Amino acid sequence: MNNSRLQFSFLCIYMLCAAGIITFADGWWDTTGNEFITTFMQNYKASYGPASFQLMIRASESSAFASVKVYNTDFEVILSLQQYQTMNVQIPASAELSGSSNFNSKTVVITSTQPVSVFSINYKPYTADSSVIFPLQVLGTEYYVFTPLGRYGSPQFAVTNSNHTNNVLITLTGSVTYNGNYYQSGDTISLNLSPFETVQLQSAASLSGTRIQSQYPVAVLSGNNCYTYHTYCDIVFEQLLPVKEWGTESVISSLPGRNFEDTITIIASQTTDIFTNSGDKSNKIVLHEGGILSLSLPPTSFLEINATNGIMVIFTFTGGMLYNIESDPFIMNVIPLEIFSDSYILHTQNNFANFIHIIAKESVKHDILLDDQPLPNDLIWNSISTTEYVWADIPIEGTSTAHTVKNCSACGVYICGAEYGISLGTIALPVKIVNPVENLKASVFKGASVNVTWSSPTKGEVGYYYVQLIGSPSQNAIVTKENAVFTGLMPPNTYTVIVEAVDKYKITKSIPKSTTFFCSIPTNWCLSRPSKKCCPKADTSCRSIDRKCFCDEKCKVYGNCCDDYSMLCKGTP
């Protein structure tokens, strides 16, 4: 603890939601949903304060009503959120967990009528950290814990149950005293958790590699209540992703203005070959179930990681200089290459030195847009020499508005901030790349109309489709379904239809798909007649080429005119 620090002023690293199914079959980490559960782990000493526990709730593409409750208490806040609006909820200090114990009235439950995103800030004077909170559909039944061990503070993790009675097994890698019983490394704690019950376990030893198995999905927060390495102690925590969401490839590079080495930690869930390359040194190591590999990341360096099975990779900022400001530790998930995205959204606030840490392919670095503007020409890019990637750090002003990174053709983006004695870092959340539409077809009907249909492999991620009809006349339409109809075509003519899918946050477009069709003259039009298209007097022989309708003046009396009679013979009514 550094009592000479400035009053805390946090960087809100709230990542606007991005949608998708968070499985590596789809390659996606989802942060939007209608149901969330979380808790606030012990920050330094439970008696220390005052505490400021905050949740930031942000609406997605639709306005929403959201409820924030502390389970089994009278605390509830109802929010009315407009599209893309963010609102803060102050959670009572009494919600803080303390020690190794079970808690039946400290779980925070968030529900909403439309998808929202949730970001958590656990703050006490001079000690704070933050994390994205993942929705219920992302949670899993198998986790491995990461709890850094420093010169001070207690490694800790919390398991939060949802709305089922749930059997949970925790196989420890460090000693724990829980419910009056002493458990050693290798022991298994068997729990039967009630709906929305939370258990927090603390130790004087590292608990990294501890395995959590559950009958139904749970949320897991993990870290240290006041981790100390190079500087003063800070709470560090992240919400962990379950084993099913782990990737096999990662590239990470050092943060700017560092004067100490940081740490990259790799955890495996099964026997896995790990290949690492830092440019001047490559290595292979085999990790077994629950195995841990910690690697140093010196200033101005990088690390490429490949694995034969899914692995969890965590970046630990160990404290010291960050962006030339003395700061305390934080931890953050490392984005696997499998979920590198084309676009990201992030959000900052004032009073911090903020910067974006971006890893992108060298071939596209000049195409990247920050808030729709090209990156500075004098931006320094550093090579990750063993790959096609480069990295850069981009200062960005702290504001209360959203920032976007676009056109990076599958890149990784992190947002970090530093103030004297305080630092925060986390992933920027990707906007899912929208795949091109498939099975594009154009079917002409009634002679001068066309029905355009297609299918979308990422239907749930699409906000709308932009459809263009190129020809004479040209038209366009914005639709939300996989269908568009255009009328008023002028046969004979050739037309081209172009369809682009736009993501729900209006950030990315798919690659356009097109098809060309010929609009021929219908056989039931006056225009199909080989000569004398219109007859000014009554003439029963003045018919279309298929002889199904008439083009003489009397057809209006008998109601049997061809479809184009009014337009062609008498002018548009």
Image: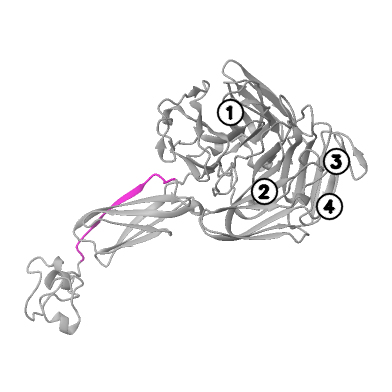
Q: Mark 3 touching mark 4, by CB under 8 A?
A: no
Q: Percent x, y for residue 521?
A: 19, 63
Numbered disc in front, either 4 or 1: 1
Quadrant assignment for the C terminus: bottom left
Quadrant assignment for the N terminus: top right
For residue 557, side relative to residue 377 (left or right): left
Closer to the camera in the image, 425 or 549: 425
Q: Residues within 10 Å of mark 3 (few under 14, many from 20)?
A: some
Q: Residues within 10 Å of mark 4 (few under 14, many from 20)?
A: few
Residue at 77% in and 57% down: 195
Q: Percent x, y for residue 115?
A: 57, 56
Q: How far is mark 2 from mark 1, CA to CA?
A: 29 Å
Mark with earlier residue (3, 1): 3
**Residue beneath disc 2:** 54
Residue 192: numbered disc:
4
Q: Secondary structure at mark 1?
A: strand
**Residue beneath disc 1:** 252
Closer to the camera in the image, 180 or 226: 226
**Start-end of magenta stretch:** 508-522
Residue at 7% in and 69% down: 532
**Residue beneath disc 3:** 188
Identified by mark 3, the residue type is: Thr
Residue 122's place in the image compared with 311, above or below, is below
Numbered disc in front, either 3 or 1: 1
Q: Secondary structure at mark 2?
A: strand
Q: How many marks?
A: 4
Q: Secondary structure at mark 4?
A: strand
